[in-house]
Image: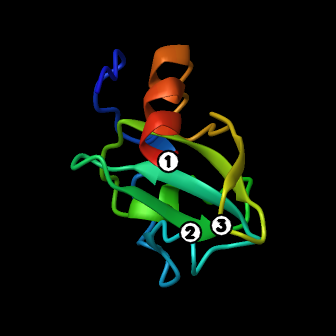
Amino acid sequence: MDFVEGLRKPAKGNRWQPQDPESRELDPDFHAGSYLAYVMDETERVVVVPGYGHVHPCVLGNGRPAYYAGEVRLDGAGTVVELNNHSGTFRFRSAEGLKCVAALLT
């Protein structure tokens, strides 16, 4: 993968938050029909929690670094229908990084 921005820690004020108990690796069957916040961890796993907004610090928790983050929506069949980089916690902006995440999820 070509994550040009490299591993990035959460914004300073978000490093203390624990991992959300609902945090788990993205599973298209389990998460079908969901809108989720995602973070790609240092092993290039896409980890998610339900919802959006200011939940990214809790996806991995404890200030763990990420390669990319944003939001993903899956239809009822578990197919990715929307993917973005909306995360104030990690602030990734690279289009190439988003393409890498999309390639892993399709």
Q: Is residue 43 above or below residue 12?
A: below
Indicate the quadrant where residue 54 lies. Answer: bottom right
Q: Which mark is residue 28?
A: 2
Q: Are marks 3 and 2 in contact (CB under 8 Å)?
A: yes
Q: Dot 1, crowdedness within 10 Å: few (<14), some or many (≥20)?
A: some
Q: Are marks 3 and 1 in contact (CB under 8 Å)?
A: no
The span from disc 1 to disc 2 (Cα, nearest Å) is 9 Å
Query: What kind of element bears circle 3?
Result: loop
Q: Position of residue 4 (x, y in %)?
A: 34, 15
Say which amino acid is labelled 3.
Gly
Q: Is residue 20 above or below residue 2?
A: below
The span from disc 3 to disc 1 (Cα, nearest Å) is 11 Å
Q: Dot 2, crowdedness within 10 Å: few (<14), some or many (≥20)?
A: some
Indicate the quadrant where residue 49 lies. Answer: bottom right
Q: Position of residue 89 (x, y in %)?
A: 55, 41
Say which amino acid is labelled 2.
Pro
**Residue carrying label 1:** 105
Query: Of the residues under marks 3 and 1, which one precedes in the sequence?
Result: 3
Q: Is residue 14 above or below residue 16?
A: above
**Residue carrying label 3:** 78
- The residue drawn where x is 35% and y is 42% is 66
Q: Is residue 96 visible?
A: yes
Query: What kind of element bears circle 2?
Result: loop
Q: Are marks 1 and 2 in contact (CB under 8 Å)?
A: no
Q: Is residue 99 above or below residue 60?
A: above
- The residue drawn where x is 52% and y is 64% is 48
Query: What kind of element bears circle 1?
Result: helix
- The residue drawn where x is 68% and y is 73% is 32
Which quadrant: the N terminus? Answer: top left
Q: Position of residue 47 (x, y in %)?
A: 44, 61
